Amino acid sequence: MTLKGVLSAIVTPFTADGERIDEAALRKLVDQNIADGVDGFVPAGGTGEFSVLSHQERLRLVEIVAEQAAGRATVLAHTGATSSREAIALSRHAESVGADAIMLATPYYEPIGFDEAFAYYADVAAATSLPICAYNFPPATGLHLDVEFLLKLAREIPQVKYVKDSSANIMQMSALLMDHADEITFFNGEDVLMLPALVLKAPGMVMGTGNFMAPALAKLQRASESGDDQTVADLWRQVYPLIRLLGSGRYNSGIKAACEMLGLGVGPVRAPIPPYSAAQKEALRQAIAAIDPALLTGAARR
């Protein structure tokens, strides 16, 4: 299955005390996202709060999403870790439970350079047959995967076929989409760059907003693919104030708060990530109210 279109960076629903994954809520969210128009899922990614999950929770999360999607949508499992050893274990497991591809953020906390990052990708590739999506998010990892390095990965490790770029570097995005689309497939991972990415015909996006705003994202992606830039611009003007608001605070907290407001019971963020304050929730509620309900999850219209 080829990765394309709108991939939901699916949240990890927790029980009210934040102690356990709410499996029933997760299965319900997968079904609702598919009904809302997503093409795939990225479980255990940044929006899925992978950094506060145990190893076993990450395994179970991918199992549930792959099982519930059941071939109706692609599954790009995030298996990046602070060690090659753990990334390999997570990647092998993802393949065994039916993920279509794996996404690898580079190790964080302990600084590494391009040589170490290349070895990390090569080691994981040698351990699994799945396609690999490089994940470029330098604010979190401390290493910016530039165009030259991404092309080296794609040329020398054939399994590296995609990149999810959350660097907010519009020059890099333009180079990858306009000059190197035949070598590596670009997925936009930065909400605020959605408009230029779509105008440049990015073949896909990985968005936390896909949890509750998939109808809008699906319409944006289809309009881009058909060359309807006017519709892209019109839809963008409507959703941008909400996207800007979410980007101005704790992103994961905002995504979960929006889900709860729109009838998607996903529970709290896990400590020490702080939940939205009452004032933040009120601003979010007003931003959501300004959007055509047809662009939001169908869960809010039941």
Image (tube, rainbow, N blue to C red):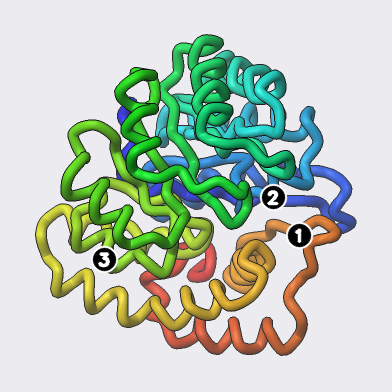
Q: Residue at x 67, y 33 (%)?
A: 81
- Measured as percent of width and height from the top left, residue 49 is found at 69, 50
Q: CA distance from mark 1 to mark 2?
A: 8 Å
User: Contact (CB < 8 A) between labels 2 and 3?
Assistant: no
Q: Quadrant of residue 145?
A: top left
Q: Few, some or many C-alpha atoms within 10 Å of disc 1 (few <14, some 14-19, many ≥20)?
A: many
Q: Secondary structure at mark 1?
A: loop
Q: Secondary structure at mark 3?
A: helix
Q: Is residue 59 visible?
A: yes
Residue 269 is labelled as 1
> Disc 1 marks which amino acid?
Val
Q: Which residue is mark 2?
A: 49
Question: Relative to 13, does residue 131 appear above or below in the rendering?
Answer: above
Question: Relative to 17, does residue 242 appear above or below in the rendering?
Answer: below
Residue 196 is labelled as 3
Q: 126 or 101, which is in the foreground? A: 126
Q: CA distance from mark 1 to mark 3?
A: 31 Å
The quadrant of the rendering that contains the N terminus is top left
Q: Secondary structure at mark 2?
A: loop
**Figure label count:** 3
> Disc 3 marks which amino acid?
Pro
- Measured as percent of width and height from the top left, residue 52 is found at 78, 47
**Viewer-nearest of labels 1 and 3?**
3
Residue 119 is labelled as none
Question: Relative to 77, does residue 96 appear above or below in the rendering?
Answer: above
- Measured as percent of width and height from the top left, residue 300 is found at 53, 69
